[in-house]
Image: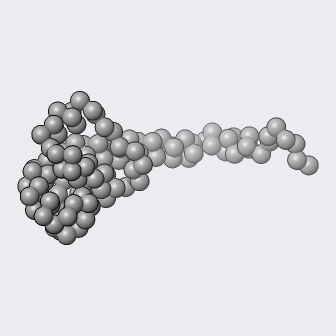
Amino acid sequence: MTSIHTIPLHLGDFLSDTVHLSPAELGAYFRLIAFHYRLGPDGLPDDETQLRRVTGMDNKSWRSSRELILGFFEKSGDRRWVHARVQKTLFGIAQKTGQNRDKALKRWNSPNAAASDQQCHGNAIHKP
């Protein structure tokens, strides 16, 4: 999977979906989304301690907010937490990456690829 350095944030959707969250819950939710992007399409582990640590919440806050925050996620078949919008974005990125890779391989394996290699030997600075 491609390493994700930026994530899309659709402010209208994000704000309307999270207006009922407290600032701490909003931060926890956002941190879980960011962690999901970092881990990839497999999603978040079903590990209470790890999820709580990712959110940055203390035990009491996590216990009282857990159900609300994890309500944005669903359990996958292998019992990991996934977010539908994150999954859609990650699969789109993977598809685009694959298409770009295929185009590059096709370009470099074409009969014209040899001409490109020969053209690369010359440049603006002449070397003897």
> How many discs mark residues in the rendered view?
0
Instruction: Give the residue displayed 17% in from the left and 40% down from the top.
Output: 18
Q: Position of residue 35 (x, y in %)?
A: 30, 56
The quadrant of the rendering that contains the N terminus is: bottom left
- Find residue 28 and report its horizontal and vertical position in percent: 23, 53
Q: Is residue 76 visible?
A: no
Q: Nearer the viewer, residue 92 or 3?
A: 3
Foreground residue among 76 and 13: 13
User: Could you say which is closer to the camera, residue 81 or residue 49?
Assistant: 49
Across and down, in percent, residue 110 comes to 57, 42
**Residue at image point 91% right, 49% down:** 128
Q: How is the image coloured?
A: one colour
Q: Is residue 62 depicted above or below 91 in this figure?
A: below
Question: Where's residue 90, x and y in %?
Answer: 30, 47
Q: Residue at x 21, y 60 (%)?
A: 57
Farthest residue, direction right:
128
Q: Is residue 57 visible?
A: yes
In the image, taking residue 122 as reference, residue 66 lies left or right, namely left
Taking the spot 10% from the left edge, 62% from the top edge, the residue there is 63
Residue 10 lies in quadrant? top left
The image quadrant that residue 118 belongs to is top right
In the picture as drawn, the residue positioned furthest to the top comes out as: 12
Left or right: 57 with respect to 77? Answer: right
48 vs 92: above or below: below
